[in-house]
Structure formats: C-alpha cells, structure tokens
Image (cartoon, helix red, strand yellow):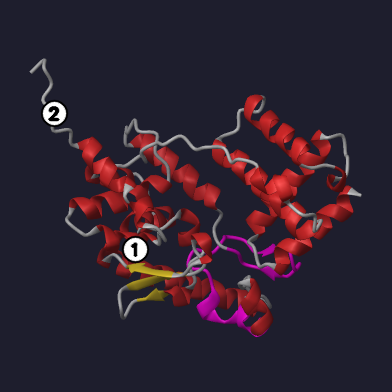
C-alpha cells in the first residue's frame, strides 16, 4: 500500500517538474506521516491526524518552524495532488510561525579572512556566493552557458520560486571562471571519449530537446569528480559538485579564521546584500540582484545596518 502510494507521489511531483530534492523531501515526510499513524492509509485520515503529527514534530522532535512547514507542504501536496481529496479544513491548518531573526552577516574583513582560508574550487564557489549574491545551490547548478562574460552577467535559472534572474560577475572572478570552464571542457572531452558526456537537463527541456544533454553549454560549471546514475532516469551522468562538500569547507574556513559568528554559506549572500546597501546602492537594485519578489524581504538588510550602527550613547560613557 505504502509503496504504491509513494510511487503516486513521485509521479505527481515529476509531472509538475519539481526538483529531485523536493521529491525526496515530500516522499520522506509522507512516509513518516503514515508510519506515525501505524500505517493507516492517508485517505482514511484528515485534519486531526495531520495536526497530531505536526504537534509531535514540534513538541517531541523539536524541529524548526521551517521544517514543520515543509512537512505540512508535503501533506497538503499529498491530499491535493495525489488523493484528490478536498482540502477543506486541512488547507486551513495554521503554519508554524518563524521567529524573527536578523541574518548573520560577515564584515568585509571577515569575508576576506574566510576566503583566505579556502582554495581551489571551494574558494571560487564561496567567492561567487559573496560576489554575486548567489544561494549555494544556485552556484552549484550554474551551466557553462549561464556565464555571460561579454556582458559581465550571471544568469540564475530556476532559482527560488522557479524564477530566473540576472546578477553581476565580479571582475576579480572573470579569469578564475574562464580557467574553471577550461577545466570543465577537459573533463567533458574525456567523458565523451569514454562514451559518456551527458548531464541532467531541466525536466521540460529534457522532453523538448533530449539530445542537448551532451552539449557543452549544458555542462555544470562545477562538476562532480565522478559520474553517477541519475536516480530518475538511470542514465549515467556527471552531476554538479555536492553542496555538503562546500558547506564543510566553509565551516572549517570560518573556524580557521577564528570568527565566532554562527555563519554558513548563506551568510555570504546576506553579506553581499548588506555591503551593497552600505556602499550606497538602492534597495530596489539589491532586490533585483537577490531575486526577491517582495521588497519587504530585502528590507531585513536595512534592519541589519541599523542594528550594526546604534546611535544611542551608553549612559556608562
């Protein structure tokens, strides 16, 4: 029963061209939901069982609000897209509220201190996170044809919210990026000579132009060191570098730079936005570079600026 249900979930996810990560997350949460309720079929359950499960996650598993909301998203998808069961009260379940927190921002000196502890591909990727305001997966998913050297533009395709946007290429990274793409070309030629050379294409494009998977322009700028079988098609491809490798390298670099802030790869994107505002760029420009659909999302960085510079004089002074 459960296996058949999960196969239906996978089919519904792929039909809507959602990412493989989303597919795995949804399948995982639905499986946990079914097991939590002693393998009852979800069609026999509803709002009460969903609330009980979400409450269990919060009170006993101590998951964050964003994780709890991801579980709810998976269950809403299950009922709406797979079971075709009218949502009714299920859709009205309140989402966990995220505590308002200011993002972790590195100073310019801290950024350069961390970058100084990195080298090679990890340094180039991290430099792009800060220099172009990219999310980590956006950087790792860059294809060769997304780097427009003539116009000094990086095209981010299918970013958060499945939106495309354009951002700047840092001039200091032009030569390192050109050298990286030359390395990609060498690996690509070796793969072709060995009878491989395919990459995973976006779902819609895979249907439209299946032969494009061997074109150089579609190769990842930061390819993995080994070829692997694509979990959806079984085709042996060269995927992009795994995000965990970069995250681990950045964590180690932060520690080596003796920076005590609880930062991560995403902190470089926060720093990109904050430092642009510090340098006098208007918030609409920063909003476009970050790909925020609502300027209120970008406004958080103005709060960071105000928190960093408190005008009040301490009474002790």
Residue 49 position by quadrant: top right
Q: Nearer the viewer, residue 93 or 174?
A: 93
- Which element is circle 2 on? loop
Q: Residues within 10 Å of mark 1 (few under 14, many from 20)?
A: some
Q: Is residue 11 left or right of residue 247?
A: right
Q: Nearer the viewer, residue 38 or 120?
A: 38
Question: What numbered label is drawn on residue 298?
Answer: none
Q: Which residue is mark 1?
A: 289
Q: Would you place residue 309 above or below residue 157 in this image? A: above
Q: Is residue 138 among the parts visible in the rendering?
A: yes
Q: Position of residue 82 (x, y in %)?
A: 79, 58
- Which element is circle 1 on? helix
- Distance in Å between CA atoms under marks 2 and 1: 33 Å
Q: Which residue is mark 2?
A: 312
Q: Position of residue 313 (x, y in %)?
A: 10, 25
Outermost residue, top side:
316
Q: Is residue 196 left or right of residue 268?
A: right
The span shown in magenta is 210-239
Residue 56 is inside the magenta segment:
no
Outermost residue, right side:
1
Q: Is residue 304 left or right of residue 79?
A: left
Q: Is residue 231 among the parts visible in the rendering?
A: no
Mark 2 or 1 closer to N-term?
1
Residue 232 is inside the magenta segment:
yes
Q: Nearer the viewer, residue 98 or 109?
A: 98
Q: Is residue 16 left or right of residue 126?
A: right
């Amino acid at each position: 029963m459960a296996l058949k249900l999960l196969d239906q979930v996978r089919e519904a996810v792929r039909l809507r061209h959602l990412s493989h990560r989303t597919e795995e997350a949804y399948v995982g949460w639905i499986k946990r939901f079914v097991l939590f309720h002693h393998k009852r079929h979800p069609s026999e359950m509803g709002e009460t069982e969903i609330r009980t499960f979400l409450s269990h996650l919060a009170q006993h598993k101590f998951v964050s609000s964003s994780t709890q909301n991801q579980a709810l998203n998976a269950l809403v998808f299950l009922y709406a897209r797979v079971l075709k069961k009218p949502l009714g009260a299920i859709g009205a379940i309140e989402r966990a509220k995220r505590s308002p927190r200011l993002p972790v921002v590195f100073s310019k000196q801290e950024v350069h201190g961390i970058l100084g502890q990195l080298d090679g591909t990890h340094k180039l990727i991290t430099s792009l996170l800060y220099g172009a305001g990219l999310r980590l997966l956006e950087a790792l998913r860059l294809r060769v044809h997304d780097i427009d050297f003539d116009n000094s533009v990086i095209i981010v395709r299918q970013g958060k919210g499945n939106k495309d946007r354009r951002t700047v290429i840092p001039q200091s990274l032009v030569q390192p990026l050109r050298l990286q793409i030359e390395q990609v070309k060498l690996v690509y030629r070796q793969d072709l000579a060995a009878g491989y050379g395919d990459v995973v294409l976006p779902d819609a494009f895979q249907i439209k132009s299946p032969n494009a998977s061997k074109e150089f322009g579609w190769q990842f700028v930061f390819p993995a060191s080994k070829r692997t079988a694509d979990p959806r098609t079984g085709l042996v491809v060269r995927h992009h570098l795994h995000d965990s490798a970069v995250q681990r390298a950045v964590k180690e670099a932060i520690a080596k730079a003796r920076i005590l802030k609880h930062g991560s790869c995403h902190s470089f994107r926060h720093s990109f936005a904050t430092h642009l505002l510090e340098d006098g760029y208007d918030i609409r420009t920063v909003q476009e570079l970050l790909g925020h659909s609502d300027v209120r999302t970008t406004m958080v960085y103005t709060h960071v600026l105000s928190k960093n510079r408190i005008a009040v004089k301490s009474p002790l002074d």
